[in-house]
Image (spheres, grey):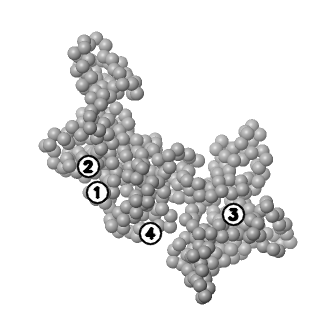
Amino acid sequence: MDWITPLNALAKLAFSDLYRTLIDGTQKGAAAALQRMSVEPNQIFSSEVLATIIEERRRQSLGVYVAPMSQTSSSYSVPGLDSDMRAQYKDLGMVWSGHYQLTLMPPPSRPDVGFVMGKGSLGNSESDLLLCTKAFAKKHNISIRDPHARFSFLTTNRGLYLAGGSNSQIAQLSINGDGVRQNPYLLNQNMMNIRADKLLYIFQWGEFAFTEGFSAERINYMQQYFKSSTAVDMEMPTPLPGTRTMGRWTLGSPIGKGAVGRVFYTSNTSGDMAAVKLMEQTHKNQTVIDTEVKVCKALTTDAKVAGNNGRILGVLDTIYTTNEKFSSRLPFDNVAIVLTPLMPKTFSDWVGHRSYGGLNGMKIEAAAAFRDALLSVKALHDMSWVHRDLKPANIGIFESTPACCVLLDIGSAEKMETGKMIETTPGQVGTIGYIAPS
């Protein structure tokens, strides 16, 4: 499913030292720890590990000094040593390399808790993923607890998260530089850096995580081991490579396209899911986009006041990539409107086989959904707003029992006032084929 690969020299040395300890055959619980490690068949030479070892010896006043080495170089240099000594020091830099594996088969030792990450004494450790032995942590002054952190899934959307084992500042844990305590931190990017005190790793989603097999396996896992309901309105998709962020939001796959922008799935590290409409603002369309932003915000405010925010798409955030509104100094600026709720389906998905009931007319579930959609339209009209682009694709559906409907694409809506008339503008507002004849 996922890989966790040592990134800095100390993490690589800890991984190699742990593997050596496990394969000597004397450690109780070695088999359980080894099944989470994927190790290359042969040792490799690491100049950065060699530099770390010799620098440590230098600090211990053993009379050995080596200038810092490039982390990417495969060569090494130890001044003042003959060829035999060079060979000896090269052996110090030989390590077992590989990564840890997060797989649901076999499950972690405590599936309801998740994959626990920490240090060993092997026989007594609570951890599924051992980062180092207790002896290694003590020798290198690494503050790793047992347990130190855990990987698990959110019951709201099945997203994978990492949470700390303690709220103590001593138990240092961070993701992409953000400190992590006991609250879940969603792993919503394809690759993320995880630091456990002095040990640095890179987390990466594996190829299997993009398959339907993974989705089915995750559902079965949660149904079997989680006590809470595993039914979700929208499942967290596996993050795509090439991450793009807007503020605190990470963009996922595209889910639609409008006249002035594209709509993407998005999430944040708290586990919230939303839709983001990304628009490229230029001198020509500046007024149009500014108007849409103002309309969305005003309608969101009115819906909250009226208690109708569950029936109409609402604005969570508005983000400008330059952190300022458009100015004449810029050729263009990306503007993002973060919208909620994220709808898994629309009425367009129901038109046809889900709606026809033969000679008896519309199916019961379709009739109930249609009624709920009309109630959402009524809620909009009761606030003196008109949508101006109603069509099946702009009515979202939660397939609950009964179905719940939300009005989407609210940027062209307009608030009515006494005596105000709205002129029809086919081709500019609305969709030909769905515009009312009047």
Sequence-first tag of 1 and 4: 1
In this orientation, which residue lies closer to the viewer: 288 or 62?
288
Q: CA distance from mark 3 to mark 1?
A: 47 Å
Q: Amino acid at mark 3?
A: Ile
Residue 337 visible in the snapshot: no
Q: CA distance from mark 2 to mark 3?
A: 51 Å
Q: Are marks 1 and 2 in contact (CB under 8 Å)?
A: yes
The residue indicated by pointer 2 is 35
Q: Look at 74% across and 45% down and name the residue there.
A: 282
- For the image shown, how many numbered marks are present on the structure? 4
In the image, residue 91 lies at what x, y percent? 24, 25
Q: Nearer the viewer, mark 1 or mark 4?
A: 1
Residue 403 is left or right of residue 96, and the answer is right
Q: CA distance from mark 1 to mark 2?
A: 9 Å
The residue indicated by pointer 4 is 231
Q: Please, what secondary structure does the residue beneath circle 2 have?
A: loop
Residue 73 is left or right of residue 329, and the answer is left
Q: Look at 62% across and 58% down and name the residue there.
A: 256
Q: CA distance from mark 3 to mark 4?
A: 28 Å
**Mark 1 neighbour density, 10 Å: few (under 14) some (14–19) many (20 or more):** few
Q: CA distance from mark 1 to mark 4?
A: 23 Å
Q: Taking 300 as reference, is 39 above or below it?
A: above
**Mark 4 neighbour density, 10 Å: few (under 14) some (14–19) many (20 or more):** some
The residue indicated by pointer 3 is 410
In the image, residue 410 lies at what x, y percent? 69, 63
Q: Are marks 3 and 4 in contact (CB under 8 Å)?
A: no
The residue indicated by pointer 1 is 106
Residue 182 visible in the snapshot: yes
Q: Amino acid at mark 1?
A: Pro
Sequence-first tag of 1 and 2: 2
